[in-house]
Amino acid sequence: MKKRIIVIATAARDGGAWRIVEMLAILASADNSVDYTFITLKPLVIANIQNIIIKINTIFDRIKFELYGIRIIINNFETPPDIILSLNNLAVIGAPLIKQYVYIHQAIPFYPEFKWGIRKNQIRLLFYQKFYGKLIWFSIRITDSKIIVQTETMAQRIKAAWGLDSIRWFPLHPVSEVVKEGRRHGGGITFLYPASASPHKNHKVLFEALLVLRLHYPEIYQIINLVLPIEQHQCDYADDKVKFIGYCEHSEIELLYTNCNALLFPSVVETVGLPLVEASALGLPILCSDTPFFREVLGGYSGVKFLPALDPLAWALAILQFVSSIHKQSTLLRFPQYINKLRGTNLSDLR
């Protein structure tokens, strides 16, 4: 008899979290040794996958499902599942007798060095840092679940915080070959940063880097564009060179890869940073924050440049050098003369 695994993904609606669900489902569809049942909020358009779709609109709906709803689903099977794999960061309290694995891909609770306040755009991160980590720990302890993480860096963080070991696994699925073959560029230089508007994504450093270029290299500033798949009001920032295009599905993000010259990724806290994996698979140049988790993910990739996450001058210089490498304009090498002058400048005063 085949082993039965229930995959619970009732916290993923879009973005990187939903992409992980899709990638796992693609791998599961090719595994004939196990019967997989995915419980999701929206349909998985993948063949050979049993998919139960439920509705969860509030936190109370989620609590009700994980305490009682999961039991109803389990009781409908002829035989109980062998394993529950939760992609929700939390173990399922309502199924304590079944072996569970919890896939932790929320890194915020394990980075206490970053401080988040009660401002509107930070309060969710504050919740994750101060309370959500405790909920994860409690759910794992009470169910005796095993932990799965995406990187060694994350495993070390959990070990330091809780003294618990983790299994390291990442369900990577190749990016579209059509995109891989079809990347093309126009006359200008387009940079892409596919991320949410959350403060830990650190858009601010890119905006300040653009400011440096606008003030000191307007001719370069005029030929570059930064594409952001978020709404302008989410960042409260306006710049002619920043294109706010709103939320994009993953297929649309793949097209953005096709039409950009390089990926920018200044995030300060991640588990993996899925766009980095996809962009490197495409051979796309990458400028990203110099962090242990990004060095782990991209350490063997020759097309990456690691930069201080919070230094806009370093990002401005890297963008300038990248444009120079494409246009071969030796005049761009004059930029370093501004570095010492600007390091003592409060960039917020230059707006």
Image (cartoon, grey):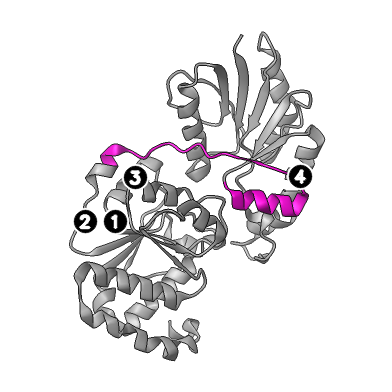
Q: Earlier in the sequence, mark 3 or mark 1?
A: 3
Q: Earlier in the sequence, mark 3 or mark 4?
A: 4
Q: For the residues labelled 4 and 2, say whether their Cβ atoms are less than 8 Å apart.
A: no
> Can you say which quadrant of the picture contains the N terminus?
top right
Does residue 79 show up? yes
Q: Of the numbered discs in the image, which one, if any, rests on residue 254?
A: 3
Q: Of the numbered discs in the image, which one, if any, rests on residue 72?
A: none
Q: For the residues labelled 3 and 4, say whether their Cβ atoms are less than 8 Å apart.
A: no
Q: Determine whether 220 is above or below 304 in the image.
A: below
- The residue pinned by badge 2 equals 185
Residue at the image point whose x is 31% and y is 73% from the top: 321
Does residue 43 show up? no
SS at badge 4 = helix
Q: Amino acid at mark 4?
A: Trp
Q: For the residues labelled 2 and 1, say whether their Cβ atoms are less than 8 Å apart.
A: yes
Residue range corresponding to the magenta coloring: 151-179
- The residue pinned by badge 1 equals 260
Q: Tell me where residue 214 sits by quadrant.
A: bottom left
